[in-house]
Image (cartoon, helix red, strand yellow):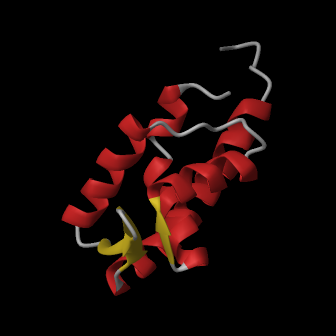
């Protein structure tokens, strides 16, 4: 598993990307999808997921829809138009960041450093 520090900086991007691909999702579905896609390397906790979803909602990037399933209530999250644009931009930014990190981490230190 990856450190929580690495996850903190990428959680919004992960959620935005999943919602852009899947339309609407509920919290447990998001955590399950992340776990499956990462082959168990990323395990989202409720303490990380829901504050991030609430922040995305407060920022106008995500809207919620509450659905009653018998005695259970499920809250679905989906992207707003601004959320869709932000998802595209964040994914592109993250891919560029990863490429830059690959260059930095592959560079051998110079003898002068």
Q: Nearer the viewer, residue 108 or 87?
A: 87
Give the residue drawn at x 36%, y 86%.
Answer: 81
Give the residue drawn at x 71%, y 35%.
Answer: 41
Asked if 86 appears above or below 98 in the picture, the reply is: below
Asked if 56 appears above or below 98 in the picture, the reply is: below
- Residue 73 lies, in percent from the top left, at 34, 64
Give the residue drawn at x 62%, y 58%.
Answer: 96
Give the residue drawn at x 78%, y 43%.
Answer: 39
Q: Quadrant of residue 82?
A: bottom left
- Residue 53 lies, in percent from the top left, at 34, 56
Q: Quadrant of residue 9?
A: top left
Q: Work out which quarter of the rendered image holds the C terminus and state it.
A: top right
- Residue 59 lies, in percent from the top left, at 22, 65
Left or right of 14 in this view: 73: left
Left or right of 50 in this view: 105: right
Q: Work out which quarter of the rendered image holds the N terminus and state it.
A: top right
Left or right of 103 in this view: 57: left
């Amino acid at each position: 598993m990856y450190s929580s520090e690495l996850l903190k900086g990428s959680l919004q991007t992960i959620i935005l990307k999943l919602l852009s691909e899947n339309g609407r999702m509920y919290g447990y579905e998001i955590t399950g999808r992340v776990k499956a896609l990462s082959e168990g390397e990323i395990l989202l906790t409720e303490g990380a997921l829901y504050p991030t979803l609430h922040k995305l909602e407060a920022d106008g990037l995500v809207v919620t829809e509450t659905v009653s399933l018998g005695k259970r209530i499920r809250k679905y999250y989906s992207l707003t138009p601004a959320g869709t644009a932000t998802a595209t931009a964040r994914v592109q930014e993250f891919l560029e960041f990863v490429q830059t990190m690959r260059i930095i981490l592959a560079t051998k230190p110079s003898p002068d450093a």
